[in-house]
């Protein structure tokens, strides 16, 4: 990455607990990036409405995710933290951008195809199709150029880049073309179905949540799918990838060389990993318990004000460029 100050932006949907895939694929990067760059990290509440949800718990999920951000180490003095719907410029910019994005681009998005297949009998709403347009607006409202996300979001960031290109071609150079930014582990796999990415939608036993208590982590890992010791299966590779991040380098080297020799004992790997994941997130668990909802609401209000100033400026310029102002 260049030494210049980049504009970094990303969001996570408030749909329940964060798992180690969310953490390793995106949040871990947010924390590292806030020290060097202009960063905007938000809670993508509008993006969470296209699937069934309970209005009674949605606000709780928003506040809980903000607590996760803070307890993991995001610092409101270093970055702007806010809720997407508190900055209505995102939605307005999305409406404008939608006029430059061919609908065929939206129909070919993998996430749209997979989720609409799953929901075929139920409710394929327009929000699911329109999702990447709103995501492009989130990004372009801040003229962000680097987007820390997991691998599953690559296509959506590419669509934001296309949207910037379409707009620039039509109205003159204005938006930078954003690129995804990955961590060392851009795709953590499910514990039980290691050919699929770890995801809440698969169910709790597929995921390790970052606030899981130690015994739960141990139980979940004990059931994780592996192989007979040669470390070649997807499940074994996934656990070794996790060990690389969470275990001491010396311990990881031993595990990895045992696996190459075909002598790795998975029960040992799993116990070590359970211990190290537990320790890794213990400070997070303590910190989260101490953060009050009241403090979070103040941080989010300040964040929305800061974000709005920037997004409003972009929106006004866009309105002028397209001739409605
Ligand atoms: P989920 O798929 O669990 O509902 P989200 O869609 O809310 O998660 O994703 C939030 C962020 O976490 C995104 O940047 C996404 O790319 C990243 N992410 C989600 N699952 C994984 C995973 N298994 N491995 C790596 N990154 C992931
Ligand atoms: N689509 C992302 C996800 O499912 C969340 C998101 C919404 C996002 N807007 C964004 C990520 C803008 C990066 C930039 O995880």
Image (cartoon, helix red, strand yellow):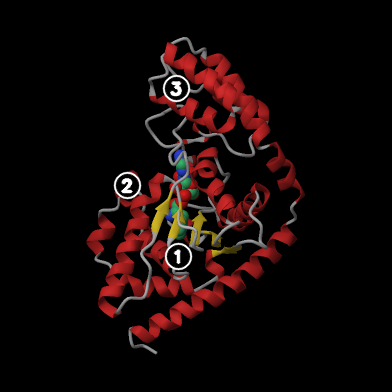
Residue drawn at (34%, 49%), measured in percent from left and top? 111
Residue drawn at (62%, 31%), measured in percent from left and top? 277
Distance between the alpha carbons at the discs numbered 3 and 2: 36 Å
Total number of numbered discs in the rendering = 3
Q: Percent x, y for residue 152?
A: 39, 46
For this rendering, which residue is in front, 53 or 323?
Answer: 323
Residue drawn at (59%, 51%), measured in percent from left and top? 31
For this rendering, which residue is in front, 320 or 194?
Answer: 320
The answer as to whether callout 1 falls within 8 Å of ligand 2 is yes
Question: For residue 217, what is the image quadrant?
Answer: top right
**Mark 2 in CB contact with mark 1 (< 8 angstroms):** no
Q: Which of marks 1 and 3 is nearer the N terminus?
A: 1
Between marks 3 and 2 in the image, the one whose residue lies nearer the viewer: 3
Distance between the alpha carbons at the discs numbered 2 and 1: 38 Å
Q: Percent x, y for residue 312?
A: 50, 78
Residue drawn at (64%, 65%), measured in percent from left and top? 300
Q: Find disc 3 in the rendering and name its residue.
A: 236
Q: Residue placed farthest to the right in the image?
A: 290
Question: For residue 125, what is the image quadrant?
Answer: bottom left
Q: Can residue 14 be seen in this view?
A: yes
Q: Find disc 2 in the rendering and name its residue.
A: 121
Question: For residue 128, what is the image quadrant?
Answer: bottom left
Q: Which of marks 2 and 1 is nearer the N terminus?
A: 2
Distance between the alpha carbons at the discs numbered 1 and 3: 37 Å
Quadrant holding the C terminus: bottom left
User: Of the numbered discs in the image, which one, if any, rests on residue 144?
Assistant: 1
The answer as to whether callout 2 falls within 8 Å of ligand 1 is no
Under circle 3, the secondary element is helix
Task: Estimate how packed mark 2 is, as few (under 14), some (14 to 19) or many (20 or more) residues with alpha carbons within 10 Å.
Answer: few
Q: Percent x, y for residue 207?
A: 52, 34
Q: Can residue 219 be seen in this view?
A: no
């Amino acid at each position: 990455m260049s030494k210049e100050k980049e504009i970094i932006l990303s969001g996570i949907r408030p749909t329940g607990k964060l798992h180690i895939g969310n953490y390793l694929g995106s949040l871990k990067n947010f924390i590292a990036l806030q020290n060097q760059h202009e960063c905007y990290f938000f809670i993508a509440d509008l993006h969470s409405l296209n699937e069934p949800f309970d209005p009674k718990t949605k606000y709780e999920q928003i506040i809980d995710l903000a607590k996760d951000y803070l307890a993991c180490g995001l610092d409101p003095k270093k970055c702007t933290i806010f809720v997407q719907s508190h900055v209505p410029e995102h939605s307005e910019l999305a409406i404008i951008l939608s006029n430059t994005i061919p609908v065929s681009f939206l129909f070919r998005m993998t996430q749209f195809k997979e989720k609409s297949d799953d929901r075929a009998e139920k409710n394929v709403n327009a929000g699911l199709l329109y999702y990447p347009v709103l995501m492009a607006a989130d990004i372009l409202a801040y003229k962000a150029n680097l987007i820390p996300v997991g691998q599953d979001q690559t296509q959506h960031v590419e669509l934001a880049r296309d949207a910037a290109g379409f707009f620039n071609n039509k109205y003159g150079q204005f938006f930078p073309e954003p690129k995804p930014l990955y961590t060392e582990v851009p795709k953590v796999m499910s514990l039980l179905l290691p050919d699929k990415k770890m995801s809440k939608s698969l169910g709790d036993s597929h995921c390790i949540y970052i606030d899981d208590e130690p015994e739960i982590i141990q139980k979940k890992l004990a059931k994780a799918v592996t192989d007979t010791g040669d470390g070649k299966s997807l499940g074994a590779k996934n656990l070794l990838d996790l060990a690389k991040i969470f275990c001491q380098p010396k311990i990881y080297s031993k595990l990895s060389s045992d696996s190459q020799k075909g002598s790795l004992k998975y029960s040992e790997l799993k116990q070590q990993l359970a211990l190290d994941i537990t320790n890794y997130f213990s400070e997070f668990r303590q910190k989260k318990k101490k953060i009050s909802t009241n403090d979070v609401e103040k941080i989010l209000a300040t964040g929305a004000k800061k974000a709005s100033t920037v997004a409003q400026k972009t929106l006004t310029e866009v309105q002028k460029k397209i001739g409605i102002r």
